[in-house]
Amino acid sequence: MSQGRELDTPYLKFLLVPFIVFGLAPFWQGNAQRIANKLWVCYIVGAILCFATAYAQVHGWLDAWLVGEGIGRAGGAVNPIYFGNISLLLGLLGLLSGLKLARRHGALGWGLLGWFALLCGLLASLLSMSRGGWVALPFLLLIVVASAWARRQKGRLIGIVGVFLAGILVAQALMPGDVLRHRVGLAYTALLSFDPNASQDSVGYRLRMWKHALDVTVEHPLFGAGPGSYVFEAEGVDSPRFRHAHSDYFNAAANLGLLGLLALLFSYAYPAWRFFRLSRSVEPWRAEIALGGLLVVTGYAIFSLTDVMFYRSIGTVFYLGTVTLLLALAEPGQEATRTERIGP
């Protein structure tokens, strides 16, 4: 267990309070655009710091406080999965931030900084070796590409391809040997050799835990077995014991039943729907904010397939805080009319 885990306590959820307050402040003060401009800078800085942390961890420079969970694998202050997933989202948000600030200030430097933030987020994700984020990456890039295509932003399309390829090349240079290909190959091999009763690799354990969660859900379909009741323990003396299903969807179904699963799906579907509608705003800065929110919601929805993003406080705080703030900033307010948006 890495140092820094003491930061992950239930009290960390109190950090939601300032997020909610400042997220609602634009309605009261009418300073939404000014707050958004400052927020963009924070995302750029966050993505760059994630890469700096990942690089330092992989090379053992921060072992006095941030100790990676595994040799050559960045994990931030909690674990590699959370760290890698959130780093990836910060990189994409950093890209939107730099491009928005470049258009506002007419400075090419901001745009370059945005592309650098995306590169940093990609590299931090790769250095974390968290494959769940890699599964989400094509879908997240597709959203950005679709938005750029709809707004005829050819430069952004070319830049995304270039930064993505650069990220892979730089990561290969930073990682020892052929680690990335080996990491992907392990997942493929584990799927081919899966044994529902004996597989003990990370992929095999996940599949076994999901099967167990389905069995629990069948026994308690409506309300589940109870909050926090899920436990999976494989046979054997030294077999690990898991208190979650390594998937938010299976975990919610086992603990809270189909009603809990529907509640989880709603927590993704409603913000995604709102952000999608707001991303068509005729005000570019609001559309960019909504696009960022859509990326966060989509990313979490995919991350939740293979891990429990809401099991730890850090994952919960990032999602609720970011979605609350971005949604509050993207909403045009009561004075807006339907004609201010493109389409219905």
Image: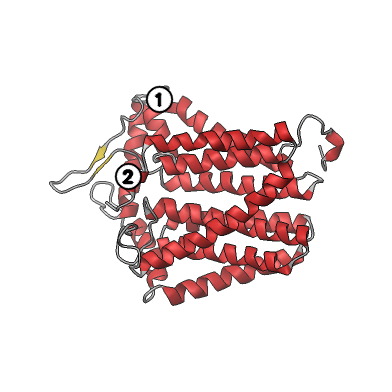
Q: How crowded is mark 2: few (under 14 residues within 10 Å), some or many (20 or more)?
A: few
Frontmost residue, 148 versus 62: 62
Three-letter residue code for mark 1: Pro
Residue where numbered disc 1 is placed:
221
287 to the left or right of 163: right
Residue at the image position 12 percent from the left and 46 percent from the top: 237
Frontmost residue, 78 versus 308: 78
Residue 210 appears in the rendering: yes
Furthest residue in direction left, as rendered: 237
Residue 250 in the image: state x and y as whole percent: 41, 37
Residue 176 in the image: state x and y as whole percent: 37, 75
Residue 140 appears in the rendering: no
Visual colour scheme: secondary structure
Quadrant location of the C terminus in the rendered image: top right
Q: Residues within 10 Å of mark 1 (few under 14, many from 20)?
A: some
Residue at the image position 68 percent from the left and 47 percent from the top: 36
Where, by quadrant of the figure, is residue 278 drawn?
Answer: top right
Q: Is residue 5 above or below residue 51?
A: above
SS label for mark 1: loop
Residue 112 in the image: state x and y as whole percent: 66, 68
Three-letter residue code for mark 2: Glu
322 to the left or right of 208: right
Q: Is residue 301 above or below residue 118?
A: above
Residue where numbered disc 2 is placed:
6
Residue 336 in the image: state x and y as whole percent: 82, 34
Work out whether mark 2 precedes mark 1 in sequence or the reverse, and give the earlier one.
Answer: 2
Furthest residue in direction right, as rendered: 339
